[in-house]
Image: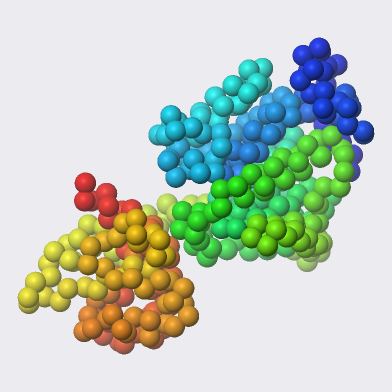
Amino acid sequence: MPPLVEPGVALDARDIDRYSRHVSLPGFGTLGQRRLRNASALVVGAGGLGAPILHYLAAAGIARLTVIDDDVVEASNLQRQVLHRDADIGRPKVESARDALRRLDPSIAVTALHDRLSPENAVDLFTRHDIVLDGADNFATRYLSNDAAELTDTPLVWGTIARFAGQVSTFWPGRGPMLRDVFPDIPDADSVPNCADGGVLGVLCGTVGSAMATEAIKLICGIGAPLIGRLLRYDALAAEYTTLRFVVDECRPPVTSLDEVAVACSAPIAHADASQRTAAGELDGASFDALRNAASGDSESPLVVDVREGWERELDAIPDSVHVPLDRIQTEGWSAIMPVRGDARQIVLYCTRGARSARARDQLAEGAPADVMLRSLAGGINAWRLLQV
């Protein structure tokens, strides 16, 4: 592949000293470093993947970095999001990241956007950068990045992590297949547990994020063989890397707008309405408390079922709830509930935020008696906990 970025001005004494280990690399030299010093990169997300990506791109000498993320730093982030410190808890992640990068290199230009990548801003942001690295944690944003890259002919480095495994690939419109060539359709938002629900090995973020930063540097400088048409898969537990090759799907219609992905991006907002949730077999926290408080000797108390993993229940649980993990429900169906059901005809399932309990509800509905009402607690124990303060 040809270099993505033209070389900038000659390196000064500071640059030669700072980047001497790059300059001494065969095939890289001062020309490669001048390309990095003339490059601009957009990083989507300042979390598990975004943190090592930003750290290594800044250290490598990328001149202009933009990071977009609408989240704030939480204590649970610090196990893997290495740009942030304990003192940053509660701050926007992009501000914490910007300050960390400026501590590393005061000369670097960092634009911090406390916002979410959206169909409204994606095309403009992609157009203004040489390369984009997608460290998002949801399917809608990943497909938005892919479609915006295809519309703007912008190279995109893509990565995902889940529990003990990660994936990396590079999509360069017109030079190889894109995300939709290997995964044509946007999966349901809750089809795979997120890091909060399923967990993630902290150091895995560094492995995958560093691989993504490497891909960006290779493209900018025109060195090596990028992961175009290849999906690199890493299993941390087995210490194995495997590669899946894929090609352009000639039958796939080209991306011509962001209309389809805009629907996926707006889905979380649409599902937030309490009346819609209740109609779909869900309860908001207030309705759940009202249901339990109404129970008396003349009123049947609902059976409350925690579908999380055992370690999560050790941290916190709704009082008087019983534990039936989601994986058992998916394996055994309605029979998983029978030993704890008793005579209950109202069953409320909960998890951390509501995604797993909704899947459990749908699974149980296939075998539940007609007189049993199954509902999922929207927002999970997180939403219920807020009402107890």
User: Going 21% across and 73% down the picture, which residue do you hit?
Assistant: 302
User: Going 17% across and 62% down the picture, which residue do you hit?
Assistant: 290
Q: Quadrant of the N terminus?
A: top right
User: Going 86% across and 47% down the picture, which residue do you hit?
Assistant: 225
The relative height of residue 169 versus residue 55 in the rendered view (above or below) is below
Question: Can residue 6 be spotted in the picture?
Answer: no
Q: Is 157 placed left or right of 349 in the picture?
A: right
Q: Is 287 placed left or right of 172 in the picture?
A: left
Question: Can residue 15 be spotted in the picture?
Answer: yes
The relative height of residue 363 versus residue 309 in the rendered view (above or below) is below
Front-lying residue, 269 or 191: 191
Q: Residue furthest right?
A: 27
Q: Position of residue 347 (x, y in %)?
A: 28, 74
Q: Is 236 placed left or right of 267 in the picture?
A: right
Q: Position of residue 130 (x, y in %)?
A: 74, 34
Q: Position of residue 303 (x, y in %)?
A: 24, 74
User: Going 30% across and 87% down the picture, which residue do you hit?
Assistant: 370
The chosen color scheme is rainbow
